Structures are given as structure tokens and as C-alpha cells.
Amino acid sequence: MASTSRLPDPIQESYEWQHRGACRGVDPETFFSPETERGPRRRSREAVAKALCARCPVVAECLDHALTVREPFGVWGGLNQTEREHLLRDAG
């Protein structure tokens, strides 16, 4: 679970970027895997999600949010959970 203590204040400006996301209106299952999903099926789903992120005008804001609150699941800002963990670890 993401740490709610790291979430921005619940004011509209803090979340405005989400209204401009390429993912808006896309099935959330594109970005979040079922618990039992593994291997090629998971990589394929993540590739579709990352392709959407690649053309998203707010990908930087999305990734910043995911890293700040340490989103534990899904593709955020073009990176999956493992890739975000590596970024955080490498940043120290």
C-alpha cells in the first residue's frame, strides 16, 4: 500500500495533472496486474501500459507521484514496480 503520509494535500491543484493523463478512461487492468499474472503475459500487458505512458503529456508528474508516495503496484510514469524500486535504490 502507498504511504498516505506522503500524499500531497487533498487540494485540486495537487492532482490536476491526472486529468491530462493518456491513461484517463483506459481500463485500470492495463496498468495493474492480477495477482497470478507472470511471465510473457505480464510483460505484454506492461508493454501496452508503457506505450500509453510514452505518449502521455504528464508522464513526469506521474512518475514523480509514484516515487514520492512509493506506489507499490502497477505501471506509473512508464515504469513498473521493480523499475521504480531500482530508481529509488540507486538514488540512495
Image: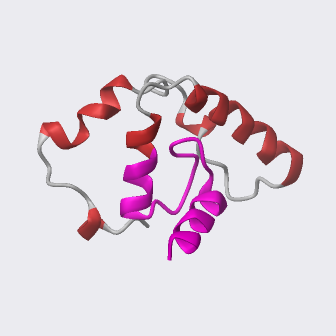
Q: Is residue 18 left or right of residue 39?
A: left
Q: In which quarter of the image is the N terminus?
A: bottom left
Q: In this view, does 56 lie to the left or right of 68?
A: right
Figure label count: 0
For the stretch drawn in magenta, what is the main secondary structure?
Answer: helix
- Magenta residues, as a range? 63-92
Q: Position of residue 77 (x, y in %)?
A: 51, 43
Residue at position x 35%, y 24% in the image: 20
Residue at position x 67%, y 51% in the image: 34
Residue 15's place in the image compared with 3, above or below, is above
Which of the pair 33/84 is nearer the observer? 84
Q: Where is residue 17 in the image (x, y as percent from the top left)?
A: 30, 33
Residue at position x 44%, y 64% in the image: 70
Which of the pair 45/62 is nearer the observer? 62
Q: Is 91 contained in the magenta span? A: yes
Q: Is 36 contained in the magenta span? A: no
Q: Position of residue 91 (x, y in %)?
A: 51, 70
Q: Where is residue 49 in the image (x, y as percent from the top left)?
A: 63, 34
Q: In this view, does 82 lie to the left or right of 69?
A: right
Residue located farthest toward the right when viewing the structure as drawn: 40
Q: Is residue 38 left or right of residue 50?
A: right
Which of the pair 43/77 is nearer the observer? 77
Residue located farthest toward the bottom when viewing the structure as drawn: 92
Residue located farthest toward the left when viewing the structure as drawn: 11
What colour scheme has been applied to the protein in the rendered image? secondary structure
Residue located farthest toward the front when viewing the structure as drawn: 91
